[in-house]
Image: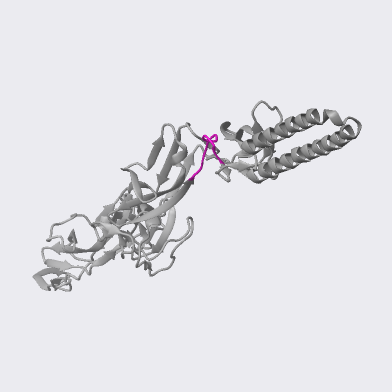
Amino acid sequence: MDLGHSRQRRGPAVSFKAAGLVVFLLSVSDALNPPSVSVSPSAEIVEGSSVTLTCSSDANPAANYTWYKEHRNLRPLSEEPQLVFSSIQFYNSGRYYCTAQNELGTSTSESISINVKHAPWQISVSVSPSGEIVEGRSVTLTCSSDGDPPPTLTWYKEDQTLHHGQDGIYHFISWHKEDQTLHHGQDGIYHFTSIHSEDRGFYYCKSENQYGEMKSQRRFIDVQYAPKLPSVSVSPSAEIVEGSSVTLTCSSDANPAAKYTWYKENHTIFQGPEGNYYFKSIRSEDRGIYYCTSKNQHGQNRSSLSVDVQYAPKLPSVSVSPSAEIVEGSSVTLTCSSDANPAANYTWYKENEDSPKASGQIFTISNVRAEHSGNYYCEAQNTRGRHNSTLQLTVVADKSTMIITIISLTLVVMLILLLLFCLWIRKKKTLSSTNEPNEPKETLELVRIKSAAETEDTKEEEELV
């Protein structure tokens, strides 16, 4: 296009007489110069304001004007000297020119640029990678928006500023505290190379300049990760009593949700999507260490829990030592034990006696006697109840003592007999000296006494045997 094109043309000759003179006038049309264009206001043009473009030319005869916008396929915008925008919009930005035309030809102006300042618009966001996001991988959020002047782009996570800049690119590399600006600058780039589970959440981008702002729709970043260390608890948290209802709870932060397994001493007792395990009526055998494992396709984790079940003493076990025959004068030990939680206290009683004989698991009688024979029972007691068991204690005489006793009795009897015999001999002598004729009678009496003594010795020997 020839923006400076013009033509020159001479008009017809005209003559007339005046006061005896013939005057010749030559009418000449000026060349059609390129029109000039202007814009009002000449300062910064802001979207929504009124703007006027004016095209003017000193053509003779007067020209007709037409307005065009570059790259609009020569479709005229107006055929008036002025192109008026009552409320100019950002899409009206561009280069404009006008043409002036009369019968002498057409001339085109220089183009003028209109730059409409406006708030951001057409904001868009994207996430890369677009598929499954796993903890530890690199992730990029991208935000783009149009605006004049170019807008500042800021990423937010649930009202937490993540990135501030004009490129709108945000890369995860680590987690930062809530309400802390992660990046601020004109470059708009903040690099994260390893996304964390804590980075999971809703994100949006805000585009803003001095004329306004615009927010994108929220995008949810779903970060998948292995289960964290499970949190385990027991309810009730206070003392657990045998027969009561008890619940073990296991929970773990995981994405996708974890499946739970409860173990006791390496034996599986429960598996399922929920981490709760119930005892309708817990028993003393249920006390011990329990383990909960949370697991998903990205990994697993485990925690342990101790369950302490309190219960009354079970039937006590009682024993006596030595377990053989208990002989008078020896030492004897009675022992009592019972399964109880908390640990039981022990008390020993003898049947038909009100006061206790001893306290503690062990009851020792140092010098046992016959009167110690009888039934003894041990009572095991704690805060949850009591129970008792009985044993019989039989004390027998020592054989060596019996032999000594028998020998002693025999010696005593023999001494008595000897004394009687001596007395008899003495009496016999007395009688012999005073009454000789009676000797046969005295002899007969001596034989009878001797026979009686022999009979008594025989009985004692039989008893000894």
Q: In this rendering, would 354 be left or right of 465?
A: right
Residue 133 location, x and y as percent?
Answer: 28, 58
Asked if 86 appears above or below 453 in the picture, the reply is: below
Res 45 → quadrant: bottom left
In the rendered image, the quadrant that contains the N terminus is bottom left
- Residue furthest right in the image: 434
Colouring method of the image: one colour
The front one of 124 and 370 is 370
The front one of 20 and 319 is 319
The front one of 295 and 162 is 295
Res 454 → quadrant: top right
* Residue at (77, 37) in percent of width and height: 417
In the rendered image, the quadrant that contains the C terminus is top right
Asked if 418 appears above or below 297 in the picture, the reply is: above
Residue 172 location, x and y as percent?
Answer: 36, 63
Residue 48 location, x and y as percent?
Answer: 34, 51
Q: In this rendering, would 136 be left or right of 389?
A: left
Q: How many marks?
A: 0
Residue 386 location, x and y as percent?
Answer: 58, 31
Res 145 → quadrant: bottom left
- Residue furthest left in the image: 12
Asked if 430 appears above or below 182 in the picture, the reply is: above
Is residue 322 visible from the viewing direction of this image? yes
Write down the region rendered in magenta: 307-319
Is residue 221 visible from the viewing direction of this image? no
Q: Is residue 316 magenta?
A: yes
Q: Is residue 136 magenta?
A: no
Asked if 389 appears above or below 196 in the picture, the reply is: above
- Residue furthest front in the image: 437
